[in-house]
């Protein structure tokens, strides 16, 4: 019996039912090869609940990470060479979970190798990579899913269902945030200090939610500051950021992140999406499995999924790795590959979000409002 903690809980909902995306016999499932086996390890474990995908390969430079992956996934083929993973015929989908600056090159190589791709957020952290990725992606005929995990949490799926059913009418204003004290992250992943920007690394969650509900964003204005925690770790770019958004539709939103504050988890969840619509209002939270809205009589209703779903989403930990979100996202992508329907966020939608995050950085640097470029006319 493995000593790895992933083996302890069952990973099944306690009393509820997980969302179903279909089920295939083992021999017909999509083979998934994962590169980057820290957050990618979460995906390997999450696949134990999958009905459509199987882990077949793992790649990491670290022998310790590879050993942990083999432990969690007996029989998994592993390597420290990405090209060797890409050469495996049983890999149908490449899952990219390496540090942000590596994503663009690894996605491009996966497309060239004829693979579908799921890539964690941020899709890329450099808008100059966009034209090349669009060209290779379009020429490959393969599909990409951005691993925007937050969308796939139970409260956020419930919020979306109600939105699509018209419960909130037109979303006139959105307020979304991701606040999380990150000393542990700088210690674990020192690359976060100087090879990316929090506007990409962390703000990708609320920025994606804003585009999901408001559609294309026309203009952004952002302010930022470097917290004392970030200064201690040597960060030079802001880790506390607030950005006002004006959508093409004329609707408005605010996205905010603070990665150096002292958390107050009962008062504010790490991630929140607050929708204010012409017909109604709602609030989805992460990691809390709580969703709040009001019914047709204005009565405030709170759905609480902790008892029913914590087994699936967190493998019974109160606050832990988000296995259920990852499994939902991967199975959703696989189900769209099978049906031929479009998936979201796909390559183009994901790159649109990258352009918006790039505009937030430009506004932080210039102090001015920035018009968000469109994909049709990407900046050189
Ligand atoms: N909600 C989410 O979906 C979520 C949460 C956390 C992190 N992330 C994203 O996941 C990515 C990885 O973050 P992390 O926290 O796992 O980082 P990490 O530093 O803990 O792990 C990165 C892993 O990639 C490996 N690696 C580095 N270069 C490699 C290469 N060239 N080939 C193969 N392996 C290589 C490292 O050895 C390490 O094990 C980042 O882009 C981050 O933004 C997403």
Image: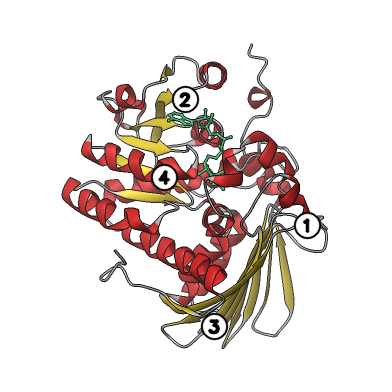
Indicate the quadrant where residue 155 lies.
Answer: bottom right
Percent across and percent down for residue 273 are 62, 68
Percent across and percent down for residue 229 are 76, 51
Which one is nearer the viewer's eye here, 8 or 136?
A: 136
> Can you identify the residue that label 3 sits on?
252
Image quadrant in which the N terminus is located:
top right
Percent across and percent down for residue 305 are 69, 53
Q: CA distance from mark 4 to mark 1?
A: 28 Å
Q: CA distance from mark 4 to mark 2?
A: 15 Å
* Circles 2 and 1 in contact, beta carbons < 8 Å: no
Q: CA distance from mark 4 to mark 3?
A: 28 Å
Percent across and percent down for residue 110 are 29, 37
Mark 2 within 8 Å of ligand 1, using the beta carbon: yes
Q: Residues within 10 Å of mark 4 (few under 14, many from 20)?
A: many
Q: Is residue 115 above or below residue 374?
A: above
Number of the front mark, 3 or 1? 1
- The mark that comes first in sequence, 2 or 1, is 2
> Can you identify the residue that label 1 sits on?
261
Observer able to see residue 161: no
Marker disc for residue 60: 2
- The mark that comes first in sequence, 3 or 2, is 2
Image quadrant in which the C terminus is located:
bottom left
Q: Is residue 32 left or right of residue 323?
A: left
């Amino acid at each position: 019996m493995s000593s790895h903690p992933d083996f302890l809980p069952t990973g099944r909902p306690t009393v509820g039912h997980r969302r179903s995306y279909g089920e295939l016999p083992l021999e017909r499932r999509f083979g998934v090869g994962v590169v980057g086996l820290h957050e990618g390890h979460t995906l390997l474990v999450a696949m134990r609940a999958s009905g459509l995908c199987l882990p077949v390969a793992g790649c990491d430079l670290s022998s310790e990470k590879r050993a942990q992956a083999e432990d969690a996934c007996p029989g998994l083929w592993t390597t420290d060479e990405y090209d060797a993973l890409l050469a495996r015929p049983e890999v149908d989908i490449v899952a990219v979970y390496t540090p942000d600056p590596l994503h663009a090159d690894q996605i491009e190589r996966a497309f060239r190798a004829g693979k579908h791709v799921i890539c964690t957020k941020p899709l890329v952290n450099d808008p100059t990579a966009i034209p090349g990725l669009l060209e290779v992606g379009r020429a490959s005929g393969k599909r990409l899913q951005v691993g925007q995990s937050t969308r796939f949490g139970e409260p956020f799926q419930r919020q979306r269902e109600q939105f699509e059913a018209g419960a909130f009418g037109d979303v006139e204003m959105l307020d979304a945030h991701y606040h999380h004290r990150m000393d542990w992250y700088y210690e674990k992943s020192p690359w976060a200090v100087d090879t990316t920007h929090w506007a990409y690394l962390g703000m990708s969650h609320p920025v994606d939610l804003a585009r999901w509900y408001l559609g294309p964003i026309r203009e952004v204005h952002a302010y930022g500051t470097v917290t004392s925690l970030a200064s201690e770790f040597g960060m030079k770019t802001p880790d506390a950021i607030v950005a006002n958004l004006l959508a093409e539709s004329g609707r408005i939103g605010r996205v905010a992140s603070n990665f150096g504050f002292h958390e107050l988890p009962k008062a504010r969840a790490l991630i929140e999406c607050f929708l204010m619509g012409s017909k109604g209002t709602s609030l989805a939270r992460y990691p809390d499995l709580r969703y709040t809205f009001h019914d047709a009589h204005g009565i405030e209703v709170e759905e609480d999924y902790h008892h029913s779903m914590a087994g699936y989403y967190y493998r019974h930990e109160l606050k832990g790795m988000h296995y259920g979100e990852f499994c939902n996202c991967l199975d959703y992508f696989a189900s769209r590959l099978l049906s031929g329907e479009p998936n979201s966020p796909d390559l183009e939608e994901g790159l649109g979000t990258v352009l918006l995050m790039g505009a937030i950085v430009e506004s932080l640097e210039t102090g001015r409002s920035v018009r968000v470029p469109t994909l049709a006319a990407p900046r050189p």
